[in-house]
Every structure is written in C-alpha cells, then in structure tokens.
Amino acid sequence: MEDYIVELTVNGERISSPVKPEESLLKFLRRNGFTEVKCGCEKGECGTCTVIINKKTVKSCIMLALQARGKEIWTAKGLEKQELGRKLQESFVNTGAIQCGFCTPGIIVTAKNYLDQNPIPDKGEIKKAISGNLCRCTGYKKIVDAIYAVAVENQKSI
Amino acid sequence: MVPFKYISPKTKNEVLEILKEEKVKACIVAGCTNVLPNIRDKKIVSKVLVDISDIEELRGISKEKDKVCIGPLTTIAELTNSEAISKEGEVLYQAAEQFADPIVRNNATVGGNLVTASPAADMAVPLLTLDAILKIESIERKRGVRLKDFFIGPEKTILREDEMITGIEFESSNINKNGCFIKLGLRKAMAIAVASIAVNLEVRENKIAQVRIAMGSVAPTPIRLTVVEGFLKNKEVNSNGLIEEAINKVREEVDPISDIRASAEYRRYVSGILFKRAFNKLT
Amino acid sequence: MSEFKIVGKPIPRHDAWSKVTGDLKYADDFSLPGMLFAKVLRSKYPAAKIISINIHKAEQLKGVQAILTAKDVLHNETVTKFGQSTEVGKGFEGLYRVLADKEVRFMGEAVALVAADTEEIAEEALDLIVVEYEPLPGVFDPVEAMKPGAYLVGENGTNIIGEFGCGQGDIEKGFAKAEVIIKDTYKVPFVDHAYLETEGGIAWIDDYGVINIRVGSQVIEHFRDVADVLGLPHNKVRYIGTMMGGGFGGKEDITVETYLALLTWKTKKPVRLVYTREESILSHSKRHPFIMKYKVGAKKDGKLVALDAELVADAGAYPYLSPWVTLYATVNAAGPYCIPNVRVKSCCVLTNNTFTSANRGFGAPQPNFAYESIMDELSHKLNVDSLEIRRINCLTTGKALSTTGQVFKTHVALPEVAEKAWAALGEPVECKEENRKIGRGLAIGLMSYGRMTFLHDSSRSYVRLESDGSVLIRSGIPDLGGGQVSLLCQIVAEELGIPMSRIKIYYSDTALTPLAGTTTATRQTYMSGNATLKAAREIRKRVINKAAEMLNVNPEKLDIINEKILVNYDQSKYLPLVKVIKACNTAGIELFCEAQFNAPFTITPDLLNIRGMTFPDFTFGAQAVEVAVDTETGQIEVLKLVTCYDVGKAINPLSVEGQMEGGSIYGMGYALIEEVIMEKGITMTPSFAEYIIPTAVDVPDVKAILVESGGGLGPYGAKGIGEPSCSIIAPAILNAIYDAVGVRIKSLPASPEKIIRALKKDYFEK
C-alpha cells in the first residue's frame, strides 16, 4: 500500500522515506528525527512547525510531505551551520528571548528567512514578519529585540 | 477505510482528465492550508489527492492589454509582490497584505481561497468588487462565470465535480484602480474577519459613475451589495446625507449571523461603519 | 560575601542554546523501539448516563493492543495530592475520576483508552468503540447550580463544593459611615492556558518492573497518585520530567500520566500519548469564571471604609483545585488596601462545564479585576486621581491584609511601584483622529508567592562538588519555561565561585532527584532557591573552613571567586578551589549536601472565617497602560504598557523581565480577546483558530521596571514573580478604556462589540 516515497534534503542531508499520501510534512520531518520542528496545532495557526523550503517559509503542518519532494528544506537545527542563523541564535540566547523554547525554532526560522530578504528592518516590520508565529511566554518583546539586534549589526556591516 | 491516493499531474489537461475519471473521489490540493486540517478532522476521507501545485500554467499574474489574469495557483504572497495587482487592482493588493499571516501567504492560493467558499474569504471580497470573471474548465467544456454568481452557500459553489478554476480575470479599468479594502478582525494577524468590505468606485464630474461594494462575514457567502450600489449610482459624491442613507441601506442589505466572534447586530452595525470608511477613503 | 558575581546578572540560561537549535527534547520528541500509540475516547455529551460501552469491534481491529474503561482501573475515583505533607481534608482536595464511570460530567471527559501499533489504528479503534449514552439535562450556570432543586452534577446532594469567608470590623457600621457607595457585579470567562506544547508523554516498564513516565508536568509528585490508581507501591512509579513548552498551571493536574501508566502496565510495552490541540482545549482545565458582587464604601476624600464581596466560582465538572483557587480569591478579594470593615464570602460550584483548576494567577486575576475596577469608579466619582486614591488606601510595611489580618513583616513597596508605573507612561500619544480616543489606566495589586502555609510546604535539593571543581545539582524541580532550573545553577555558581558552565543539573526525576515540590504557586525561586542555597552554603562552609585551616586565616575572611578561595583583604593570598577539594577529600570531609527548606507551617484555618497567616509572603506590583479606542468599531489598541513590581532581588534580570513582559501579554489576552466560549457545556472555541491569543503585531513594547527592595523571603531577598506578573493588567486596560471613552466594561474580555454596545446605546436599543 505504501508505495509513495518522498526524497528531499533537510539541512543539506538527503532523506528518503515512504509516506502515506495524507501525511503532513511536519509529521514526516518529526518521524525522520527532525524533532526541532515542533507540533503545536496542526492547523497552521501557531507557527511552531515553520521551516524554510526553497527560500520560503512554510508551516509544515499544512503541507503534504509529498508536496516537498525534491525540495531543499532548512530547520532551526540546520541554521546553526549558516552565519545568519547562528547570529540569530546567539542573539536570542544573549537577549533572553527564550523562555519555554517551544516557539523558538519556528521563530528563528522565520526571522532568518526574513532577514535574508530584508536585512535591516525596523521593529514594526519585524513584528509583522513574525506575526504568524505565536509565543505564549515572552510577550514578544525580547524576541523582537533579539532580531532587531541582528538587523542593527547587519546595518553596521553594510 | 479506503486509503488516500495521491497523484501529481503535470498539465492542466491531465488534471481535468483525472477529475472526469475520479469525480467526487478527487480532492484538489494546492496550497493545502485547508485540505490538511480537514483531513485531520476527517472532513476529507479516502480521497484521491490531486496535487496541482507543480502546474506552472496555472500560476502567475499577467497583464494583458485590457485585463489582468491571475492563475488560480498564484499565492497570496505573490499578489503582495505584484506591481500589476497594486496598480490595476489595489483593493486585492490591500486584502492580500491582510491575509492570514506572512507564512501562510506563501502557500495559500487565490484559487484555493475562492473554492473553499468561506463567508469570510478574504480574496473573494476584493475580487467581487473587481468584478472578476472565473475561467472554469472541465475536460468537456469551458465556461466563464462572474465571481458574484460563483458562491451558492457556505462552502458551496457552482463548481461541478469534474470542473476546476483555471483562471481569474479582471478588467484594467478606472474603477478597478480605485479601491479600498478594510478587514475588521479580533486581532491584527491570523484573523478571521468579523466583517470585511471592499469598495471600488469611479467618480466622474463629481458623480458616482460606477460603484461596486462587497462584504465578507455578513452573509452566507461573500456578497455584492447591489441595492446600495444601485442607490449610489449617479448620485453626487458630496450630496447631503448621502453617506448616512447609504449606511442605513448597507445595514439593511447585509444578512449576518451571530457566532463566536460577534453577534449579527454588531456585524450589521459595523458593516455601515466599514462602508463609510472605505467610501470616504475613495472620495 | 562581597558583591555578586553571577546573581543579579542578565546571563543566558544554561539551557538556552539547546532551545535555539531545537536540540532540547520535549515530551513529544522522544520515542522508544516498539512503542505503542495511545488515544483517548472522549465524551460527546456534557452530561449523560453511560448505558453501555461495547469495545468488541475495536478489540478485533488488527494492531489494537489494549482497550481500557473505568472497570479496568483499580482505584478510579481519586484525589490528587500536590506533594503536600498535611492532610487538609474538609472536601478541600481535588477529587476526580480517571475514566468516566456510569456517567459523564463534561464534554471531552475520558471514557476509554486505546493503545495500538500506530496512531492511525488507535484512532480507528476509537471510532469502533460504541458508547450508548442517555443524555441528561445538566447544569451550566453556577448560580443556577446553587439553587435548591438544581440538577446535581455529583453525588453529594449539593453542587457547592467549597465555601469560604473572611473579613474584619463591622460591615454594617462601615457602610453607615460611608459617604459614597459603589455596587457592581463583575464577570470573567473561562480561559485556556494556550501553552504551545500540548500535553504529552511516554511510559515504559524498566528492567526492575518500575513504570517510568517521561512527561511534561508541573508536579512530578503525582507519581504517588498514579501508583495509588494502579494499586502499586509508590516506589514502583517514576516520573522523569521534561522541560515543558509552557505550563501556566495547565500541567499542574495530572494530564496524560495515569493513562500512560495504565496502558503500559496492561501491555507491558512502551506507550506514547500526545494530545492534539483540539483535545487539549477540550479536556484540560480552564481558568475559573467568577461572578463577583462587590460593594465598596468610602469617604468623600477617597478613604475606604467598607468592602463587601461575594464571589461565585464555576468549578466545572469535578473539584480538582477549585477549593484552593477559591480560597486564593477570597484572601485576595480586598486587594492591597487598608479597609477597616470587610466581609468576603465565596464559594465554588460544580457544573457540567469543562473542569476548572489552576491557571497562572490561581484565583488572583479575577478579584483583582473587580476591586481595581471599583477603585477606578471611585476615583472618577470622587474626582480623586487614580494614583492618589491608591496612595491613600494602600497597604504599607507593617500593616495587615484587610481580609485575613495577616501582617506584612516584609517590605511592602506600595505606593512606590504605582508611582513609578504611572510616571513611566510619559507624555500621552497625540491623536487628532475624531474616532480614536486615547485613555490611561492604572491598577495595583498583590499576590502570594509560595503555597498556602497550612499545606506545610518543603523543597529539597542536592549539591555535590566534584574533585575537579565541577558541580552536580540534583533537584526535583520542574521547569515550565520560566527558567526555574537555570536559577538553581546560578545560585550554586554564585555560592561556590564557579562559572555556570561548570555546573550540570539533573532535574525533575522522582527516583533520582530530591523532591523539590511543585512548580506552581510561584514557589520555586522561594522554595527550591532556598533549599539549593542552603545546600550550596553548607558545602561552601566546608571548603572555606578547610581553606582557612590551610591558609591559617579566619574563615570569615575568605571568599570563593573564579574557582579560587582567596583572602578578601589580600587577594594575592589564595588557594585554587581544586586544591582545597583534594584536601577535603583526603580528610574525609563530605562535599555533598542534600538540604531541605521548609516554608512557615500553620494549621488549617477555619475556612468560613480565615484569619492570620495563610501564605508565606506576597509580591506587590502596579501596571499602567495607555490605549486607543476606536469609537466606531470598538477596537482597542494598547499603545503603552508598563509593568512595575517589587521583585525583592532579580536573581536573573532577563528571566524576571521575561516573566513581567510575558505575564503582561498573557493578561492582556485575558483583558481583550481570550475566552473559551461554552454553550451548554459545549466548547465553541475548539482550536487556535477560535481560541485566539495575541500575536506580535497586537502587543505594545512592554516596559518592565524592576524594583529590588531585597525584602523577599527567597534567596538574596528575592520574591516570586511568575503569577503576580499577569494578575492586574486586565483592570489597568479596562480602566484605560473607561478613561478614553467613558465606558465601564464589567465582563471580560472587553471585546469591540461590548464597547460598541455601551457606546452606541441608541443604535442597539432601537
């Protein structure tokens, strides 16, 4: 019955695994060990499962695994290896932008992809950019500050 | 339980063939923002998932000489990045910027938003005031349908089981260039409209030459307010009491329900306010 | 000790990196070979008799390994304890049923459990279980439920499960002296905790026959309750707590643990159970709705003379923590004010709504909303400004709580916090738009930290100094995201003069870590902080004494800084810490210590006349906001939000600010948009599409002002902040709305519709 195979790359690593047609990309990723992609609502309403697919952010709970065939996916874990991702992670750590940490990987992913395209946003733009990612602990203040700190650094280096 | 199947056709015609073959068993998947939650809720079971997301001919925005064509697979994010949309149909552009959130906008498609036929559909409301025409195809025939004739009830459209939307068009015209969309939600992102409005207006020599008004979440489907439109047509823009009277007529024409977000009475009331604000912005 | 090296510094938490990379494994990120997947069959009715349950078809389904119903549970009717060492009795404990038996009392109540080879099979099996119900009328309004002849939710002959009272003076005489009296009724709704991680865990039986449960829980002491349900000795059940993706009180009661234990015990295989979001909203506890009747009397100058409050809390379908929450509300009912004549009466009542229990604030946010709204009414009626009316009435150090008479021996930072918060609003935002009005509001409040003293609370912690100078901490402390675990590392690093990186902490394991009590009641900084401080100081004393002997100086002259023990008047004289450790080891001096900290113990009070100490101490704070109200749509925008608390001592300012910022927004959601809507017991807001919480674009930049009086009972004078931080923002916002448009909203949330209905009475009444 399971004759559907998904092949894709996650954080530069090639993954191949049989799937059911209705399996979400989120379930697929978690099943394959990418547990940094969190499951918060499975309805596209919380953003904890956000990943980057071919340079766009996607809530992986509302995408079929089969729709990601052949695509290049990045998660928070993989962003560790990229300069901007690492900078953001460092900024989150130092700013205290983390409490329970459950929204953190999704927000890091969103912020990284956003800053790639808009390197020096203001705080209002940052808020808009992360408005699809819920956080229940921080009140968003330190998250926005952490992303903004990286934007300020970007501006200096331009 | 019969298991799901998955097909990813590469051309429009392949899709139409599959629809003809599978009929009700087929479930078209594109942005998937509604399909997966519905699968999880068991509202969609045992279907053949027809993934059309790779069909390039159904995607993209093109400006022809007197009209703008939008492929149904065009994402909401693509609308927000389109000069043609912001120039020729700003009302749609404004609605796209308020749609869900930036991440969902990367996946959600215009066609998907229309066929879901939610009374709150954020794309339907501006496309109604752009007087959009849907190109609908089956393997046997093609037809063009005005969007205002497309919805027949909550989550119900005239689309037959072997048909799909293959294009969305609106005219390049003065009235379409002058539009305003306002959405009233309970929060500023990821909001489902409590009420939404789009108004497109063309004023000539201080008179309302043409006006189109559409609203979301105030009736079983997104609606055009044709009575109000008729009332306003040919009236002087600044005539005394015009807006007040129009507000009353808006409140008469809408047909809202009470739900968890607001009561029918509030929706009726605020419909008038939204109309006033959109109208004032355009005059 | 000289000045702090690590305490009080805004340092990253020890676990921060594992969270930004996503390496940290939460409850749902863990699996075991051969594990089964569990699902819960839930009631479709809020009130019904169970005529029969037929599991025959479901059992036949290939891949189904176990199906359990109430008859399979040895002790199905149970009382959860929360690690307290006293038997408080008096119907004061959280009775509930593991699985519904003969009847269901709320929609979503667990009826049967399934374990199967895959999640899909488990789900299919749920569909094959046939439950025959006979729907019952039920009762959904607590006031209705109190009336004689009301539908009875439980078996006790009354729906009232707890009654409380307290006060002082003579209420009649008090009101006789009043020159102005305000009477009003305030209502607050059900709300969800909306932590982003739903409830989940995995259980297995280890080589020694012990049930291990790896779960996100605020109360690992529930291992005893789980063991009791299964009829096992307590040492045969072990909790391994994970970091939680938020708790806020919602993971204080048992969630998945008993189900996991039952299924793993039955199948002898590992079992995983994770709730979906919908299941979580449907089935876990909610914050108590309250109906609060208030009458307040004052002199013309604003001085309060009498307060009479009647509180009714909706307990939902089972008691759980309702009596405790109601007691908190009762004690908090007169706020931080000196009022000579006070009477508070309260009760909690069973209904067929989803059960209610702990939610951040635990009975404080509700009365705080009521009394701070009244104070604002008074301020407008008497034309005494908001700050002044609070200044002349508020408690100060040495005064006593007007409800119970508990005397404040520690520092009371009122009205200082109020002045600071109010001033921090700065110049008002200018607004020329006709339909947009700006307004400001203030609220002050108090909330306890530490558990009720008659529960005889204690916490234990273990610290061991290794021979290489690294440190191992073992503490049962659960961490729900507030940084509870990291806090202990910081205290030990400070005391033993080592960097955070030299510390490894094991936490939240009932078999291997000393029990630290619950991460609830804003108690861990205070309780486990003190226990850990005590253990660390004991070890510090031992190494310093040894070093003193080696250096031949008075131990009082020694300090440990940067892994050196040095003479504080001559820092060139020192010994490397490692060298002293070696000497201690050679001499047989123990460099480990398990310490216990006890809170003050009191006897259980007369619940109808609560007097004296009920809590160890309180945290005081103030919040000020500026809002814009759209007078045509009723939409509210919070433009500025200031939160100012006396936190005693901020051990980690980043974490404390985080609590204050996050708590403010948690409370802002309560004020403006959050409500679990229940219609006749049916949840109408079953997912995050309907139950909405604030997004990044809905919030102002919260300004947090930390006052550090050093007057707390925690380590270094710290106070608790987790729950107080969210408990007064709602009245501040609603007072600001009144200031902007003259509309007093008396029921939360202050939705646009409520505001418009009040503003446009002409339209809506026609």
Image (cartoon, grey):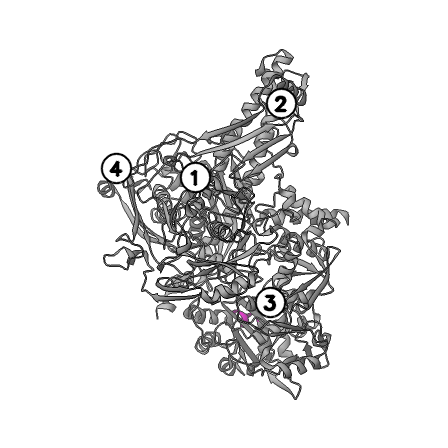
Give coordinates of residue C677: x percent, y percent: 42, 61
Give the Cα distance between marks 1 and 4: 36 Å
Q: Which residue is mark 2?
A: C560
If the image is split into quadrants, where does the C terminus of chain B sit? bottom right
Look at the picture and state if A4 lies above or below C555.
below
Residue depicted at x 48% and y 42% = C236
Answer with mark 1 or mark 4, whichever residue precedes in sequence: 1
Alpha carbons under labels 1 and 2: distance apart: 36 Å
Q: Residue furthest right?
A: A158
Q: Nearer the viewer, mark 1 or mark 2?
A: 1
Locate residue C407 relative to residue B106 in the image: left or right. Answer: left
Given the image, what chain letter belongs to the residue carrying mark 3? B
Residue under numbered circle 1: C83
Looking at this view, is C480 or C380 the one in front?
C480
- Cα–Cα span, label 4 and label 2: 54 Å
SS for callout 1: loop
Write down the region rendered in magenta. B277-281
Q: Are marks 4 and 2 in contact (CB under 8 Å)?
A: no
Which chain does the numbered disc 1 sit on? C
